[in-house]
Image (cartoon, rainbow, N blue to C red):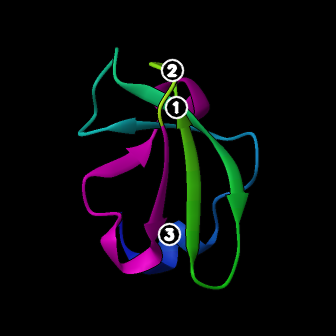
Amino acid sequence: MTPEQSKKLKVGQRVAWQASATDQGTVTASDWSGVRIEWDNGKNQFFHHNNMNEVEVSRDNLQ
């Protein structure tokens, strides 16, 4: 996703790594600099808004 799309993510929203149906996580924080994602595998990761090109909104959120 683009930096502009990343800035619109909300806490609780589901995201996926490279459109994966199994590699998904939940946005746990978002601020001016980036987004924190808690992945379903237990890892917690921070991404700057301009580094979200491999992440996209989960298809579950699009239904």
**Which residue bears the numbered disc 1?**
25
Mark nearest the camera among 1 and 3 is: 1
Local secondary structure at mark 3? helix
Residue type (three-letter) at the residue carrying disc 2: Asp
Q: Nearer the viewer, residue 31 or 20?
A: 31
Q: Report the residue that reaches farthest toward the bottom.
A: 32
Quadrant that contains the C terminus: top right
Question: What residue lies at 64% left-to-right and 68% top-to-bottom?
Answer: 8
Are the two marked residues, 1 and 3, in contact with CB atoms closer than 8 angstroms? no
Question: What residue lies at 55% left-to-right and 23% top-to-bottom?
Answer: 60
Mark nearest the camera among 2 and 3 is: 2
Q: The magenta stretch spans which residues?
A: 44-63
Local secondary structure at mark 1? strand
Residue 8 higher or lower than 14, as above or below? below
Q: Quadrant of residue 33?
A: bottom right
Residue 63 higher or lower than 53, as above or below? above
Are the two marked residues, 1 and 2, in contact with CB atoms closer than 8 angstroms? yes
* Separation of residues labelled 1 and 2 (CA atoms): 5 Å
Residue 16 higher or lower than 23, as above or below? below
Residue 63 marker? none
